[in-house]
Image (cartoon, rainbow, N blue to C red):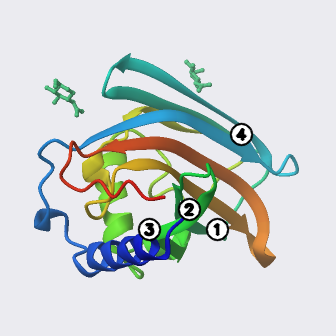
Amino acid sequence: MEVVSKVALIFVATICLAHDERKDWSLEGVVLRTEKVVCDINPRHGNIKCTTKTKSRNVTHVNMNLTLSHKVETVTYNIKTFYQFSNNEYRPMLIDSTMDYCKNQKGIEHSPLHAAFKKTLITLTNIYEACPFLPGKVYYIKDWNFVASDLPSLVPAGRYVLKAQFFVEHNEFLLTFAIYFRVENYGILDLNVG
Ligand SMILES: *[C@@H]1O[C@H](CO)[C@@H](O)[C@H](O)[C@H]1NC(C)=O
Ligand SMILES: *[C@@H]1O[C@H](CO)[C@@H](O)[C@H](O)[C@H]1NC(C)=O
């Protein structure tokens, strides 16, 4: 990738982060398409299943069932987005945020990103306000359509992965939830990097 376009991308990313207010940008013409969801769990802790169901060109339902094999009281998580460059390599971009999940439930820690997700997801899942996580209970996401307004700011067109990784005590890996998606901005902001 050219140095110039790399700089342009970082510049745009910085602007996006500086305007971390959903109202600041227009959704006109921005389409987000979920391509796939990949889930993975540490088998010591339980099992997980994720599926996607395409409903129409711009609507894909994401479903997840998670069952834990024991009580989990401490959960931290990291949300990170990766952008696919022209050589097909995904590199970190825009979002990299680590939170204490259980503290966040009580509003002690707060970020616009998590607030945005919470707003959309809250009616479609029982994982919010779930700490501590109990064994045997099914934690689910039901028919979640991930849309552009779930993102904290306008992002350049292209392919992305949003990866959420969860950890239990002592930073032991619990699970990964990764959404692969494409953003089409219809010329509003298309860097065509590379
Ligand atoms: C999907 O596209 C249709 C037609 O363009 C539009 O009316 C609808 O609001 C879109 N839905 C979402 C979730 O973006
Ligand atoms: C989750 O469990 C429900 C109820 O058993 C089932 O209907 C649904 O298909 C499951 N979803 C996934 C993604 O496994």
Q: In the image, which disc is placed on residue 131?
A: 2
Is there a contact, CB below 8 Å, between mark 3 and mark 2? yes
Relative horizontal placement of residue 55, taking residue 24 as reference (left or right):
right
State the residue position of label 3: 105
Marks 3 and 2, how far apart at CA? 8 Å
Q: In the image, which disc is placed on residue 136?
A: 4
Q: Helix or strand or loop: what does disc 4 sit on?
A: loop
Residue 189, x across and y down, in percent:
24, 56
Mark toward the start of the polypeptide (1 vs 4): 1
* Disc nearest the viewer among 2 and 1: 1
Q: Quadrant of residue 147?
A: top left
State the residue position of label 1: 75
Mark toward the start of the polypeptide (4 vs 2): 2
Residue 94 seen in render: yes
Relative horizontal placement of residue 91, taking residue 18 as reference (left or right):
right
**Amino acid beneath label 3:** Gln
Marks 2 and 1, how far apart at CA? 8 Å
